[in-house]
Image (cartoon, helix red, strand yellow):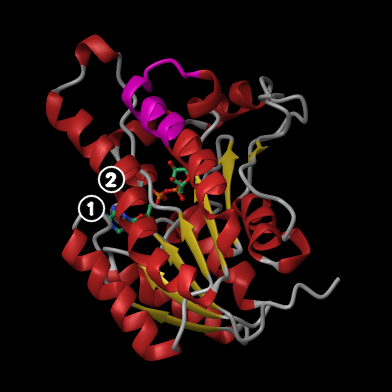
Amino acid sequence: MDLNLAGKAVIVTGGGSNIGRGIVLAFAREGPNVVIADIDEVQAQKVAKEANDLGGKAIVIKTDVTDVDSVTAMAKKTLEQFGKIDVLVNNVGWGMDRLFIEKPRTEWEKEVNINFWGVINCTRVVLDHMIEQKYGKIISISSDAGRMGEYREAVYAGCKGGVIAMSKTLARELGRYGINVNVVCPGMTLPESPEHAGELSMWKSPMAQFLTPEVQEKAAKAYPLRRLGKPQDVANVVVFLASDVASFITGQTISVSGGYTMM
Ligand SMILES: NC(=O)c1ccc[n+]([C@@H]2O[C@H](COP(=O)([O-])OP(=O)(O)OC[C@H]3O[C@@H](n4cnc5c(N)ncnc54)[C@H](O)[C@@H]3O)[C@@H](O)[C@H]2O)c1
């Protein structure tokens, strides 16, 4: 199947680590120009090199998705470099598992800033251009936590649910301009090697130390397909939604979580 992505201009936020890395590498095999918009420039450069070694065309633009000026500058540089923006993948996310009543306000604020404001900022900044060119694909990475709630992830889940509701609304508002807006919800998807996670990755935080092989094995039993996710599982669906093969799909939320949620 020809996905016809060659020559397109794609932005992947948080493309330096784990799922974002998988998405960048999956695009690299399909021929578009890719901007890795990550706050961790060093890690993002490593992924750009991997993508370019695969024959891709990836560049890094250091970006903080929570900072409107930084996001605006990233969109401007993308337009200068590639002349257009066809696809935005809102992939950056962050959470710290903790009971709601035990969580400090600083963690809620970080979760809201990254998981919700980050998506609002990046989406807004590409829209004038996408509306003018009457073409665009926006794919946001949410979470099954945003569909059904998750123990110890109250505010993270709230933000991810917000991303789903916002995307459905945008799909209704933007369809007339040829813009598709969809959401992908991964299940638990660990980096396949420590080098695949940046220093700011959730998987380098103290939270991750509890994910021993035994805990992972137990978690996998909650998934009907009896395994945890791989970045490539999520990336395959993102690349499909970014292509014109999926041009009649909008406002949808797709879980890539081995059947963990069925909605
Ligand atoms: N991995 C999972 O199990 C899982 C499950 C459900 C949903 N998700 C969602 O999938 C997405 C990717 O998850 P992951 O595990 O690959 O994340 P990760 O923590 O491994 O990587 C996040 C990336 O975002 C970058 N980043 C952090 N803050 C940033 C900022 N302010 N501006 C720009 N870049 C920033 C980091 O440098 C890093 O490269 C997230 O939205 C996450 O919520 C992940």
**Contact (CB < 8 A) between labels 2 and 1?**
yes
> Does the magenta segment cover residue 258?
no
13 vs 249, left or right, is left
Residue with the mark numbered 1? 66
195 vs 206, left or right, is right
Q: CA distance from mark 2 to mark 1?
A: 6 Å
**Main secondary structure of the magenta stretch:** helix
Can you tell which mark lies on residue 32? none
Q: Is residue 228 visible?
A: yes
> For the residue with label 1, is its CB less than 8 Å from the closest atom of ligand 1?
yes
Is residue 246 placed above or below 118 in the rendered structure?
below
* Amino acid type for the residue under numbered disc 1: Thr
Query: Which quadrant is the N terminus positioned in?
Result: bottom right
Q: SS for tag 1?
A: loop
Q: Position of residue 184 (x, y in %)?
A: 59, 44
Question: Closest to the observer: 177 or 243?
Answer: 177
Q: Position of residue 194 (x, y in %)?
A: 44, 54
Report which quarter residue 112 is drawn in: top left
Residue with the mark numbered 2? 117
First in sequence: mark 2 or mark 1? Answer: 1
183 vs 208, left or right, is right
Is residue 122 placed above or below 60 in the rendered structure?
above
Q: SS for tag 2?
A: helix
Range of magenta residues: 149-162
At 23% from the left and 74% from the top, the residue drawn is 73
At 48% from the left and 70% from the top, the residue drawn is 130
Label tally: 2
